[in-house]
């Protein structure tokens, strides 16, 4: 296993911005393949915490840090998929058998820290996002495909409740909607997975492309 990597105090608006090459093929692919899905970046961590205005508002020990991006077209089925897959991803070793990828966060009785995405063209007012749905338009981030904050806030709250109902509510932590958050984490591995929800709308788009 590689040494642990520590990443201290990330400003959320600069994390995980999607970049596209400026060649013709990349521009064509970005236009043709219209992935409309909830997106999650899942990191296996030794520990993680969220800080707002110099105060730690959430922290976990071993478990998963999940950065969630909500697309404008997402529905409850997307939230169900992300919740189910995150809680069942086999990202942890089984010490009894020696298998490296055998246990889920639930089987290990570990914790989950959820990071909210609220990408929007007016993002200076809504700085709770990890910019998973940011694309470069020239040299400037463009968040037009993300769900607007007015809709995203209750949608995200329902996602947090879904995680808590599906697992141990005390094991699910989250940040503060609408706040400029900083995240301190110790990657375990490091192990980072990107997960997009699967739903009929993506199947239709793939068939058209």
Image (cartoon, helix red, strand yellow):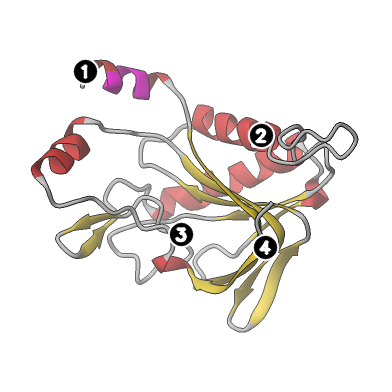
Q: Which dot, 2 or 1, sits closer to the camera? A: 2
Q: CA distance from mark 2 to mark 3?
A: 21 Å
Percent x, y of residue 15: 44, 63
Magenta segment's dominant SS is helix
Q: Which dot, 2 or 3, sits closer to the camera? A: 2
Q: Which dot, 4 or 3, sits closer to the camera? A: 4
Secondary element at tag 3? loop
Q: Which dot, 2 or 4, sits closer to the camera? A: 4
Whether residue 127 is visible to the viewer of this picture, yes or no, is no
Numbered range of the magenta stretch: 202-206
Q: Residues within 10 Å of mark 4 (few under 14, many from 20)?
A: few
Disc 4 marks which residue?
A: 4
Q: CA distance from mark 4 to mark 3?
A: 22 Å
Q: CA distance from mark 4 to mark 1?
A: 43 Å
Percent x, y of residue 89: 66, 34
Secondary element at tag 1? helix
Determine contact: label 4, label 1, CB under 8 Å.
Answer: no
Q: Return the residue nearer the eye: 92 or 104.
A: 92
Q: Residue at x 82, y 51 (%)?
A: 170
Disc 1 marks which residue?
A: 208
Q: Is residue 130 left or right of residue 175?
A: left
Q: Earlier in the sequence, mark 3 or mark 1?
A: 3
Q: CA distance from mark 3 to mark 1?
A: 30 Å
Percent x, y of residue 150: 42, 54
Q: Residues within 10 Å of mark 2 (few under 14, many from 20)?
A: some
Disc 3 marks which residue?
A: 130
Q: From this view, report whether residue 193 is shown above or below residue 59.
A: above
Disc 2 marks which residue?
A: 89
Q: Earlier in the sequence, mark 2 or mark 3?
A: 2
Percent x, y of residue 32: 18, 31
């Amino acid at each position: 296993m590689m040494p642990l990597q520590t990443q201290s105090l990330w400003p959320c608006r600069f994390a995980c911005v999607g970049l596209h090459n400026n060649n013709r093929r990349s521009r064509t692919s970005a236009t043709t393949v219209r992935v409309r899905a909830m997106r999650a970046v899942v990191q296996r961590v030794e520990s993680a915490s969220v800080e707002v205005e110099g105060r730690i508002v959430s922290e976990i020990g071993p478990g998963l840090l999940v950065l969630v991006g909500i697309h404008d077209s997402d529905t409850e089925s997307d939230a169900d998929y992300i919740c189910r897959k995150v809680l069942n991803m086999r990202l942890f070793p089984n010490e009894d058998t020696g298998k490296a990828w055998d246990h889920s966060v639930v089987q290990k009785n570990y914790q989950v820290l959820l990071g909210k995405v609220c990408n929007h063209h007016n993002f200076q007012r809504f700085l709770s996002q990890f910019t998973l749905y940011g694309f470069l338009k020239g040299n400037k981030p463009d968040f037009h495909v993300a769900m607007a904050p007015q809709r995203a806030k209750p949608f995200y709250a329902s996602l947090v409740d879904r995680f808590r109902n599906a697992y141990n509510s005390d094991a699910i932590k989250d940040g503060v909607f609408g706040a400029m958050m900083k995240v301190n984490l110790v990657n375990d591995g490091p192990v980072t997975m990107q997960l997009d929800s699967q739903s009929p709308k993506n199947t239709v788009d793939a068939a058209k492309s």
